[in-house]
Image (cartoon, rainbow, N blue to C red):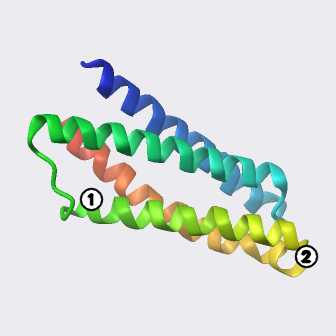
Amino acid sequence: MSGKLIAAIVTITCALICYTIGVWSEHRERKLKVMHLVFFWLGLCFDTTGTTIMTSISKDAGSISLFSPHGITGALAIGLMIIHAVWATVVLVRKDERAQTAFHRFSLIVWCVWLIPFVLGMIIGMQ
């Protein structure tokens, strides 16, 4: 196993851990807090790093396909994660209590969408 592949696996796993902690702790508390936002941003950073490394590995192997189910859902997931983190930041900066208590619903949707390319990547990686 190459060093690049190990780095990709570790960073994507860190993304899963951070994003899951952020989303599910927010869901349990029913109110968006700064701690959750930190985990959202960390998850996004780890996911972007891992995706960049995996893209590099695919390019090196000559097997990159951005229009595969994994590529499409991965791009959608990163886009949603960006929207999610930015919107959470705005909600907290504005101190919008109503939005802070309803935000967990959107978080769960984004997390579920994010899991699709994560699982697809695991399946592809095992082949």
Mark 2: few/some/many CA within 10 Å (<14, 14-19, 20+): few
Corner quadrant of residue 126: top left
What kind of residue is marked 1?
A: Gly
What kind of residue is marked 2?
A: Glu
Give the percent coordinates (x, y) of residue 76.
40, 67
Q: Can you identify the residue that label 1 sits on?
A: 71
Q: Is residue 85 above or below residue 106?
A: above
Q: Is residue 114 above or below residue 106?
A: above
Question: What residue is rendered at 30% in x and 39% in y?
Answer: 54
Q: Earlier in the sequence, mark 1 or mark 2?
A: 1
Give the percent coordinates (x, y) of residue 47.
47, 46
SS for tag 1? helix
Q: Can you identify the residue that label 2 sits on?
A: 97
Between 102 and 49, which is closer to the camera in this rendering? Answer: 49
Question: How many callouts does the rendering have?
Answer: 2
Give the percent coordinates (x, y) of residue 95.
91, 71
Query: Alpha-carbon distance for marks 1 and 2?
Result: 36 Å
Q: Farthest residue to the left: give it.
A: 62
Q: Farthest residue to the bottom: give it.
A: 98
Question: What residue is rendered at 69% in x and 47% in y?
Answer: 39
